[in-house]
Amino acid sequence: MNIRTNSIGVIAQRVIATLRKSGCQVLAVKAAQVRPMIEIAYPSPELKEGAIELKEQVNGLRRRAYAARLGGCIVHWHEDPVREEFELTAGMSASEYIAYRAAGFPG
């Protein structure tokens, strides 16, 4: 790894910590050359205020997505998922969550 990759990783970790403190669930982090993209569920009201709406079409299905910049990262989410699913999986470790998903439960 070079310094640039390390600095991007540090930026992403800081933003992830901020998002988790505000009640967001981090779903994925994708490294990019310029800035990391962090996919979340349950964005905070402050994050929603500064977001732009995107319209995505994946496999013929249209859906709304949103994106905002935070601390040098792009934060991305889809329309609000069901909150009960988050509450059910929030306390799981990574291995428990993987087993939960492998058993066919939605994620």
Image (cartoon, rainbow, N blue to C red):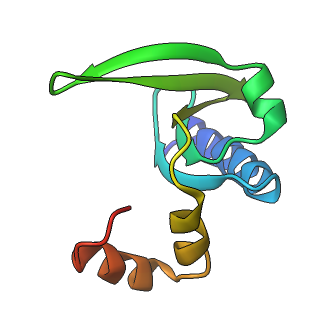
Q: Residue extending furthest left?
A: 59
Q: Quadrant of residue 11?
A: top right
The residue at the point 64 percent across, 47 percent down is 42
- Where is residue 107 drawn, in percent x and y? 38, 61
- Residue 7 vs residue 78, the one in the foreground: 78
Q: Residue 7, position in %: x, y?
A: 65, 41
Q: How many numbered badges does the structure rendering display? A: 0
- Could you tell whether 41 is left or right of 55 in the image? right
Viewer-proximal residue, 46 or 28?
A: 46
37 vs 62, nearest the viewer = 62
Residue 29: x and y in percent read: 49, 46
Position of residue 3 relative to residue 24, above or below, is above
Q: Residue at x 57, y 28 (%)?
A: 35
Which residue is drawn at the image coordinates 56% and 15% (left, top)? Answer: 53
Q: Is residue 58 above or below residue 95?
A: above
Above or below, 100 relative to 35 = below
In this picture, residue 97 sits left or right of residue 6: left
Q: Choose between 22 and 9: the one closer to the eye.
A: 22
Residue under the image location 66 percent in, 23 percent down: 68
Res. 87 image quadrant: bottom right
Residue 34 appears in the rendering: no
Residue 47 shows in this picture: yes
Q: Position of residue 89 (x, y in %)?
A: 52, 74
